[in-house]
Image (tube, coloured by chain):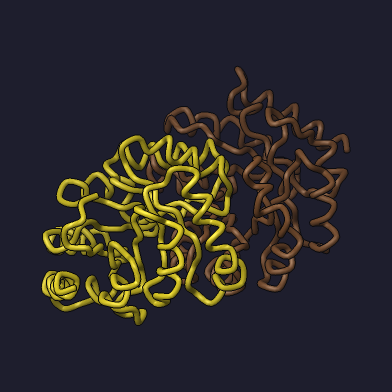
Chain colours: A yellow, B brown
């Protein structure tokens, strides 16, 4: 995945035609477009192939299964054109290693904690431990919440040279500047881009915020 | 989901035509057919609609996301004909509640622990806590490994009248008799049915093992 704009679109629009139109318009302003299962359930898995024609695609599938199933999900996503797949780390070393192995030259990013209220119950207390598991398994990087720059900094201390993607910029309250300053490589912006009247202009604006850092 | 055969097929075959043929042949011998993301990535989400024409479908999507994404995944799965969706509990109360709410009259089953080696690192030590979270959120039941009947019994003590589905029967070493004796409502069998020369006959055999209990 290139690191030029330091910006990733979280394409959480689920109307297929609208999602594709936004993806194509925004692609020049971001390094990658992140999609999730709801879009696959509405548009079909071919949406990965389609978006990968004009952008790197991050499959935010939060894979959390036994090693063989993890392997199948990652293999099929990469075969369809995904540049990266997001997996959970709490499933343990063998599931993580299966993901890394199945990805080949594509990247695996591990979730170390989740920022919604329920995520603080179990995931947040174990975040550093999850990051170490990911490091040992050979992942390319981690997901850490832009809404909590202190958590990005904590993961950065463990992650070394690995990449950090930070969701939660824009509508959820995180800022590009704070996320990058805390150690993120990419800010992930969703609704503030795909829900804007002019998504391309909104993406260009976030990209300029990232560039000015 | 009916409870007649006390048997669920884990349809982990990912060649679409073969998966559908097996599903149709096995349907009369099981209460439901469980599918996972690899089949959706190969066959498309319409496979849920197709299988639901002749069987209850359990979407084993191990959903592990923020509440809004959980809601979208469950809603779309149920709209396509799923009778139940499997979610992780470790994402906390709000994600679980979103799943239950989005399911409407369909069922939500929560994973309390995973039986692969990596699952023992984080998931197993928290299984009872996960079951209590699920109970509070109003799930219909839990997933507990047939390979460890003691764990089924432990979850049964918390689950009260809720249902327990137990994967791992057959090729992974669990038995129908042990799983049901320990408190499971359904034994889930995968490869020993879908990989058999005659999947319908294999399913009938497992169903008779369940009936003789």
| Residue B23 shown left or right of residue B7 in the figure | left
User: Residue A205 placed where, x, y %?
Assistant: 14, 75
Residue depicted at 49% across the width and 60% down the height:
A112
Q: Which of B130 and A146 lies nearest the eye of the viewer?
A: A146
| Residue B129 shown left or right of residue A95 in the figure | right
Which quarter of the rendered picture does the C terminus of chain B lie within? top right
Which of the 4 image quarters holds residue B159? bottom right
Q: Which of B71 and A10 lies nearest the eye of the viewer?
A: A10
Residue depicted at 44% across the width and 63% down the height:
A155
Residue depicted at 53% across the width and 77% down the height:
A117
Is residue B79 something that shows in the picture? Answer: no
| Residue A89 shown left or right of residue B190 in the figure | left
Is residue B102 something that shows in the picture? Answer: yes
Question: Residue placed farthest to the top in the image?
Answer: B197
Which quarter of the rendered picture does the N terminus of chain B lie within? bottom right
Which of the 4 image quarters holds residue B168? top right
User: Residue A182 placed where, x, y %?
Assistant: 34, 72
């Amino acid at each position: 995945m290139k690191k030029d704009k330091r910006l990733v679109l979280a394409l959480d629009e689920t109307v297929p035609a609208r999602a594709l139109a936004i993806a194509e318009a925004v692609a020049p302003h971001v390094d990658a477009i992140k999609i999730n299962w709801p879009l696959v359930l509405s548009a079909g898995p071919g949406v990965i192939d389609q978006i990968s024609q004009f952008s790197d695609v991050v499959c935010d599938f939060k894979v959390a299964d036994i090693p063989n199933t993890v392997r199948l999900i990652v293999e099929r996503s990469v075969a369809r054109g995904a540049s990266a797949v997001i997996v959970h780390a709490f499933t343990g070393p063998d599931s993580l290693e299966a993901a890394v192995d199945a990805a080949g030259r594509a990247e695996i990013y591990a979730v170390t904690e989740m920022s919604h209220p329920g995520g603080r119950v179990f995931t947040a207390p174990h975040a550093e431990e999850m990051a170490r598991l990911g490091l040992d398994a050979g992942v390319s990087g981690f997901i850490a919440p832009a809404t909590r720059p202190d958590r990005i900094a904590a993961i950065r201390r463990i992650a070394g040279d690995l990449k950090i993607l930070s969701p939660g910029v824009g509508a959820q309250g995180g800022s590009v500047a704070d996320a990058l300053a805390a150690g993120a490589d990419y800010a992930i912006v969703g609704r503030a881009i795909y829900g804007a009247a002019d998504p391309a202009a909104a993406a260009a604006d976030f990209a300029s915020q990232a560039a000015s850092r």
